[in-house]
Image (cartoon, coloured by chain):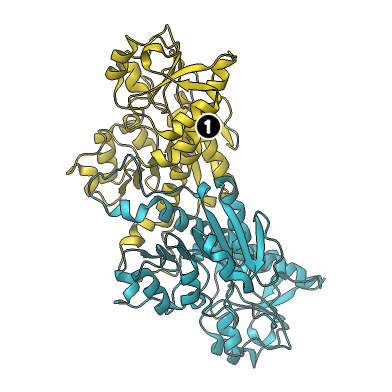
Chain colours: A yellow, B cyan
Amino acid sequence: MKRVLVAIEPGSTSALVDAVERGGGSIASPGEADALVWTDPRSPEQLKALLRECPASWVQLPFAGIEAFFAAGAIEPGRTWTCAKGIYGHSTAEHALALMLMAARRLHVHAAASSWVSATFGAPERRLAEQTVVIVGTGGIGSELAAMLAPLGPRVIGVNRSGRPLVGAERTVEVSALLDVLPEAGFVVLAAALTKETSGLFSSSAFGAMKSDAWLVNVARGGLVDTPALVDALRDGEIAGAALDVTDPEPLPEGHPLWALPNAVITPHVGNTWDMALPELTALVERNVARFRSAAELEGLVDAATGY
Amino acid sequence: MKRVLVAIEPGSTSALVDAVERGGGSIASPGEADALVWTDPRSPEQLKALLRECPASWVQLPFAGIEAFFAAGAIEPGRTWTCAKGIYGHSTAEHALALMLMAARRLHVHAAASSWVSATFGAPERRLAEQTVVIVGTGGIGSELAAMLAPLGPRVIGVNRSGRPLVGAERTVEVSALLDVLPEAGFVVLAAALTKETSGLFSSSAFGAMKSDAWLVNVARGGLVDTPALVDALRDGEIAGAALDVTDPEPLPEGHPLWALPNAVITPHVGNTWDMALPELTALVERNVARFRSAAELEGLVDAATGY
């Protein structure tokens, strides 16, 4: 079997080079490449420019959220496109679990305290076993999260486009029934791709449907949430709190009202850092290079119809 | 079968009364009781005084840590004693998991931030999948924690008195080998009873054996840790941090050095609050009253030899 010529642009690392070579590829310049691994999540225009001079029939995007590449028209239909959907689910789900437990156990409050405050009865801390968790999006993140929640014992309800059952959920409903299940949730976790259909999915009507003691956890994309409506909901006590690893706009600018709200906790998109991702990504690249060589179906094929 | 006369002292709740009655008991005064449920964890002397006038052959203590009752000589050998060991494991293990994830994802740092700080490479957040967790104490808390960690993927090492395997652990060692396994840990979780043997178990030699990027998590008893030695270890960077739901002294007094250390996070003994405990406790009381009636072995028998 001939070796596959793979370009890694605009920047590479030895770990990616090793992965390509373990998969049976050889590093090549873009002008002669059979395949391209594109490493910068923020530069669809630069990718479009490079592709004009690049014969690669397959392009691997090493991130899960590729809406910016669709928006820029970079996902040319004449080539095969793969992304990293699914493989970062475990790490990002762990971050969602961390944020849920932080909120339930009020760690953000306790961490800032400088004296011992406890209540014998009526303490506000909660355990997940008594909660209902609504998981919106049942791909890599959502399914890993459901597995992580199982030993903790909450009731889980899944929400997705098709209603296809989320393993570990009591039931799974179509997104059209979102407002029907939100009133049950102590925690709502956003784990969906950002598409035309999901953009701004959480607006005032969603917050209005949630319980006043419920938390919103977003580890997916900031654009799933109508941020001004969220600020209002947090200020008015319509919901109890929000833990956000992603924001809109992102990075969240200094002075944004969310920074000042005591019931909003922001983490700077660290659900799946580059360091956490690299082992998963290099394993995917190795597998896909090997599959490409043997003309097998690639993992993580981008679906132009759904946008992810 | 005759009904069992059960006294609930020094204070009762309707939930406990219901539990006794569901188990086949009738509420009685201490002077005529066959059994006593003692509800105040901080009053062994008061219990001793009451027992002089109480014929109960069985005493249920509704807490897991009963070292204060042993120390006061309240655990009279002529009666059968049960405590709540084991049944609060799930709730307390969840708190340990919350504290571990907080530390790994640096939520205590992010929650206090008012601007977006992120690093593309070399971000300090960690995921548990890459970590080794040493669990000291493999009873109710330790075994529940191991089950909760399983889907997250860290390597687990158990430590206990006997070396009896902890389910879910790669291996379990006797406490005499503690210093041998500590250098492997990214997280050390204390989940052991406080006894003569475990008092001050974590002193300077233990901290010296831990990695400089390791966290100590204590959800069991403050007395397991030599607090001045912990303060030194945190100040000197000998270990990365400590997340403590229990302290020595407890409550931790205002102005104590731990409050001022940025790498010490204190929660005020909320691993298992009264509200979280009540469903588990009432279920235990119901089961034990029924067992007492039918002369079956009671759950949670206190072992005078080990002290818990």
Which quarter of the rendering shows the C terminus of chain B? Answer: bottom right
Q: Residue at x 50, y 59 (%)?
A: B187
Rate crowding at label 1 as few (under 14), some (14 to 19) or many (20 or more) other CA atoms within 10 Å.
Answer: some
| Total number of numbered discs in the rendering | 1
Tell me if residue A210 comes above or below residue A70 in the rendering. Answer: below
Which quadrant holds residue A1? top right
B297 lies left or right of A184: right
Q: Is residue B120 visible?
A: yes
Question: A109 or A171: nearer the eye?
Answer: A109
Q: Residue at x 31, y 64 (%)?
A: B262
Q: What x and y, as percent, mark residue B154?
A: 56, 50
Tell me if residue A284 comes above or below residue B104 in the rendering. Answer: above
Tell me if residue A120 comes above or below residue A264 in the rendering. Answer: below
| Chain assignment, label 1 | A
**SS at mark 1?**
helix
A84 lies left or right of A250: right
Which quadrant holds residue A258? top left
Q: What x and y, as percent, mark residue B95?
A: 49, 59
Which quarter of the rendering shows the N terminus of chain B? Answer: bottom right
Q: Residue at x 28, y 13 (%)?
A: A49
Q: Is residue B280 visible?
A: no
Q: What x and y, as percent, mark residue B227?
A: 42, 77
Q: Residue at label 1?
A: A283
Question: B233 or A238: nearer the eye?
Answer: B233
Question: A266 or A210: nearer the eye?
Answer: A266
Q: What x and y, as percent, mark residue B105?
A: 40, 50
Outermost top residue: A78
Q: Amino acid at mark 1?
A: Ala
Which quadrant holds residue B194? bottom right
Q: Residue at x 34, y 25 (%)?
A: A199
